[in-house]
């Protein structure tokens, strides 16, 4: 079975500073990886996904992530954050032909002026 | 259009009440999901419907009863809930079908349920 570990539960960051959210997964087979964002009192919104191909994936709102098979990681980055990026971020993994998304515990990003 | 809608936004119910949560999508998706999310936790999968048939039931108590009346609608019927069932209930959909199961799940805004 696959699992996801988000290494940071809380990440405080100043506005216009870069941010990196770490995600590691464990699986003995090929996986598909996602980052979702949840703003306060809202549902989940897809930021980006890796299914195959280029290991550097660009998403919405200036986010990008790099799939590293040897490190079993899928870290999310943004070079310059805004106050509006304050939210909960979830890394998720699924297997081929599997409906089940396994979510990490989440990382709370708080952006301060 | 990647919108999944859910009604109501908020619901307060007593332990003896019967209520229903509704979810709708018009993206032609054939897989629909119910998740439960407690505060500060990730979503937990409850049910998956594929082509209007129940595909996955994650050992959810029978006081939660899902229904998929057609390819666009998904309901969750609630009866005799407990206070610990209070949570955000999220609906999601994806294209579904052979070869596309790993496609993106699109989430609705959720229904915040409080059981008194």
Image (cartoon, coloured by chain):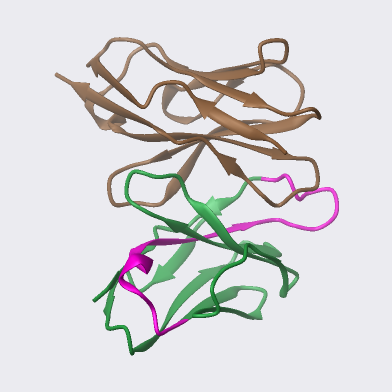
User: Where B14 falls versus B102 (above or below)?
Assistant: below
**The magenta segment:** B78-103
On the rendered structure, is B83 left or right of A52? left
Identify by letter the chain in green: B
Magenta stretch contains residue B79:
yes
Q: Looking at the picture, how far across and down is residue A14, in whole percent?
A: 21, 14
Q: Residue at x 34, y 66 (%)?
A: B84
Q: Residue at x 33, y 43 (%)?
A: B40
Residue B105 versus residue B38: which sits nearer the camera? Answer: B38
User: Where A36 falls versus B76 (above or below)?
Assistant: above
Q: Colour of chain A?
A: brown
Q: Quadrant of residue B46?
A: bottom right
Q: Looking at the picture, how far across and down is residue A66, in whole percent?
A: 60, 15
Q: Residue at x 79, y 41 (%)?
A: A96
Is residue B28 visible in the rendered structure shown here? no
User: Where B107 falls versus A15 (above or below)?
Assistant: below
Q: Quadrant of the C terminus of chain A?
A: top left
Q: Looking at the picture, how far across and down is residue B92, in whole percent?
A: 55, 58
Number of marks drawn:
0
Residue A1 versus residue A50: which sits nearer the camera? Answer: A1
């Amino acid at each position: 079975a696959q699992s996801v570990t988000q290494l940071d539960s809380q990440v405080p960051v100043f506005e216009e500073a870069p941010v990196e959210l770490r995600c590691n997964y464990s699986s003995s087979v090929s996986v598909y990886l996602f980052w979702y964002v949840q703003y306060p009192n809202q549902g989940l919104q897809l930021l980006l996904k890796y299914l195959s191909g280029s290991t550097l994936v660009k998403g919405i709102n200036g986010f990008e992530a790099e799939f590293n098979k040897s490190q079993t990681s899928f870290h999310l980055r943004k070079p310059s954050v805004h106050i509006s990026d304050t939210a909960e971020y979830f890394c998720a993994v699924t297997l081929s032909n599997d409906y089940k998304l396994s979510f990490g515990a989440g990382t709370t990003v708080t952006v301060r002026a | 259009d990647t919108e999944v809608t859910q009604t109501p936004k908020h619901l307060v119910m007593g332990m003896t009440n019967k209520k229903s949560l509704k979810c709708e999508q018009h993206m032609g998706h054939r897989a629909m999901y119910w998740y439960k999310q407690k505060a500060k936790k990730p979503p937990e999968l409850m049910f998956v419907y594929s082509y209007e048939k129940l595909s996955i039931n994650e050992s959810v108590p029978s006081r939660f009863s899902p229904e998929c009346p057609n390819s666009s609608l998904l309901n969750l019927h609630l009866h005799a809930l407990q206070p610990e069932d209070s949570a955000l209930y999220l609906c999601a959909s994806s294209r579904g079908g052979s070869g596309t199961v790993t496609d993106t799940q699109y989430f609705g805004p959720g229904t915040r349920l409080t059981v008194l």
